[in-house]
Amino acid sequence: MQVNTQKVLGLTFIHLLVFLVWAGITANAQTTTPLHWGVKAGINASTMHGDAVDDAEYQAGFNGGIYLNYKFAQNWSIQPEVLFSMKGAETESSLSGQAITTDYELGYLSIPVLAKYHFNTNSNVIPSLYLGPQLGFGLYGDANDNEIDDSLADAEFGLAFGGGIDLLTASQASDLIQLVGLDLRYTLGLTDTFDVAGDPEAQNGAFSAVFTLGF
């Protein structure tokens, strides 16, 4: 019996995240804890690269979801997230010497797990840098307004890295909003965006800017 490794990894990521969110909410309801959760929303500027793409223009789309942050050391934390991410690009490729322009619009459920380093500033402004793997599940795909769901790969694997600034706003642990922040990152796709045997590969790449609210 064949095992779909991407689906197994995806379910593992999701189960881990659900458990951590439950643990974080339960702990926050009881006492001060190194766990906190939050929401985030912003924009992507995405494109494609790879052998299937001669040239590509960036395309804007929504990016947002929820996250959980667990601080396991003074300067270090781990942060899994579940995001809805709109990606795509306007690409140009050559077919039999003729330039073909295609406008892709793609939607993903993205699950990054980030190792995050927090800088000591002795203030309520905390900058950070982070890096981690990301697993994405294709939800839908359009090319020039034509549905291409069957051609979109079920899952993609990538690497997310970037930095952010958090402003600690709470005066006490019982305050609803603990922090507000700005997060800037780049996500590099490492696997083929499409599942079409024999075709050249194309990978996603996206810059993201999102605002966060931590609870």
Image (spheres, helix red, strand yellow):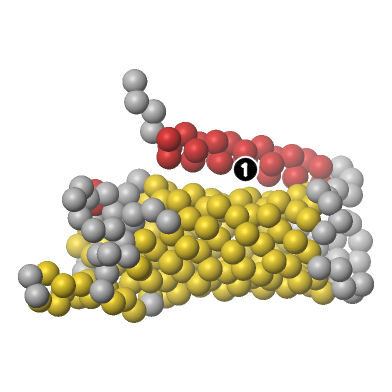
Q: Quadrant of the N terminus?
A: top left
Residue drawn 62% across the image and 38% down it? 16
Q: How many marks?
A: 1
Residue drawn 60% across the image and 72% down it? 184
- Toward which corner of the image does residue 106 lie, by quadrant? bottom left
* 31 sits left or right of 89 in the view: right
Q: Nearer the viewer, residue 139 or 92?
A: 92
Label 1 crowd (10 A; few <14 / some 14-19 / many >=20):
many
Q: Report x, y in % for residue 205.
A: 43, 66
* Residue extending furthest toward the top: 1
Q: Nearer the viewer, residue 145 or 70?
A: 70
Q: Nearer the viewer, residue 185 or 61?
A: 185
Residue drawn 81% across the image and 68% down it? 119
- Above or below for 11 versus 50: above
* 86 sits left or right of 160 in the view: left
Q: Report x, y in % for residue 26.
A: 78, 40
Is residue 20 in sight in this rendering? Answer: yes
Residue labelled with disc 1? 17
- Toward which corner of the image does residue 176 lie, by quadrant? bottom right
* Residue extending furthest toward the left: 96
* 92 sits left or right of 96 in the view: right
- Above or below for 89 versus 172: below
Q: Nearer the viewer, residue 108 or 127?
A: 127
Is residue 152 in sight in this rendering? Answer: no
Q: Secondary structure at mark 1?
A: helix
Q: Quadrant of the C terminus?
A: bottom right
Q: Report x, y in % for residue 157.
A: 45, 51
User: The residue under label 1 is which amino acid type?
Assistant: Leu
